[in-house]
Amino acid sequence: MKSKNNNYTSLLTKVCAVIGGISGVFTILNVINNIVQNLNQWRWAPIVILTFITVVGWGLAVFFSCKNKKKENSITDSSTDVKPVEMKINGESKSNAICAWFDDYIQSGEGYEYMKTIGNAEEQNLKIKQMHDNLNELKGKHDSGYLESRLYYLYIFALLHGASKRVWAVSLGGEWIDSPEEKEFLRMNFEVAKKHIEFERFFVISKSELPDLLSSEPVLKQIDFRNSFFKTYIAFKEDLDKVSHDLYRALGQGFLAFDDFAVADDRFQNDVARGYIFTDQDICRDFSLKFSQLRDFAYPFDKNFLEQNQ
């Protein structure tokens, strides 16, 4: 009701301003006409002109005041429609965003098919509940705690599903196995790039491990898929160690990062991925630095490299 009354008041004020302006125009025209017909009326002209200027000035002042007020109201009203920034560093918004991506993923066709590999409906619902419970804990801690394999992958799938700018990863080579999780993981890697989101992966291995890496079908698929949005590089542990042994150690067992928003830090056991999800700003920056340092040691991991090393 208050908003409607303000609108009526604003409209009435504008109408009054317009009437005042029109009245002033007719007044001055009448004066000019009288001056032409009777020069004796000239002595009244300055007073009428001053009156006209005052009326017009008042009308213009009211008009621009209303216009500025409308602009301020427009800004205030539009801001109420803007959703809170869910990508801010730390805070509940990150957990809420991941939860929304997760729920959207498992309702998608591919997500629905993957969930079938977890088990029957009861087992799927249990895993979904565990995921939601962990996401609630993430709000306050900014890290997920140690996650067993299925929960860890579900986090990664949710983050890949929601990625909007770039994904950057470090692989130490040994994780590419034939499992439902890894197949879905690889598919989603490619889907990110198909959405024209930049995806970069550094393979960091010792030179003696190169033959095994080049015989891995998932790795060869990535080389074959390589394009302007999906970029693969390779760096050798021996080259890093020439500068500092700490460079390789700092990579841990590999990691995957999303939009500078969160990092999945791998922990492998029996070739099965487990690990932690971090959303803390400082931790994300630390991983970003590790990733950037690899650029000085990396080669394009493409078909040309493949031809030269087979």
Image (spheres, rainbow, N blue to C red):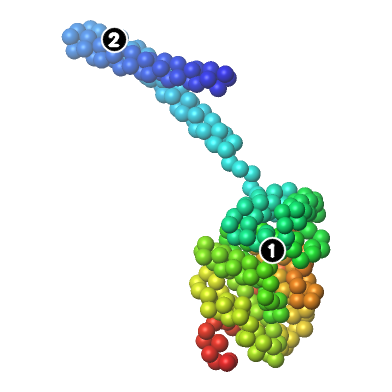
Judge left or right: residue 6 versus residue 153.
Answer: left
The kind of secondary structure element at disc 1 is loop
Judge left or right: residue 132 versus residue 48.
Answer: right
When the figure is inspected, residue 308 is found, relative to residue 233, above or below; the finding is below
Identify the residue under disc 1: 117
Where residue 118 sits in the image (x, y, percent)? Answer: 72, 61
User: In the image, what residue occupies the spot 61% across and 43% down?
Assistant: 83
**Given the current orientation, which residue lies at the most extreme front position?**
120
Mark 2 neighbour class, 10 Å CA radius: few under 14, some 14 to 19, many 20 or more? few
User: In the image, what residue occupies the spot 50% across and 21% down?
Assistant: 7
Identify the residue under disc 2: 43
Do the CB atoms of the residues marked 1 and 2 lie less than 8 Å apart?
no
Query: Is residue 19 among what the camera can see?
Result: yes
Where residue 39 sits in the image (x, y, percent)? Answer: 20, 10
Whichever of labels 1 and 2 marks the residue nearer the N terminus, that label is 2
State which quarter of the image contains the N terminus: top right
Distance between mark 1 and mark 2 Cα atoms: 99 Å
User: In the image, what residue occupies the spot 51% across and 28% down?
Assistant: 69
Judge left or right: residue 153 versus residue 145.
Answer: left
Query: Is residue 297 among what the camera can see?
Result: no
Where residue 150 sits in the image (x, y, percent)? Answer: 74, 63
Judge left or right: residue 141 versus residue 164.
Answer: right
Task: Say which amino acid is labelled 2.
Answer: Arg
Which mark is in front, 1 or 2?
Answer: 1
The kind of secondary structure element at disc 2 is helix
278 or 68: nearer the viewer: 278
State which quarter of the image contains the C terminus: bottom right
Q: Quadrant of residue 287?
A: bottom right
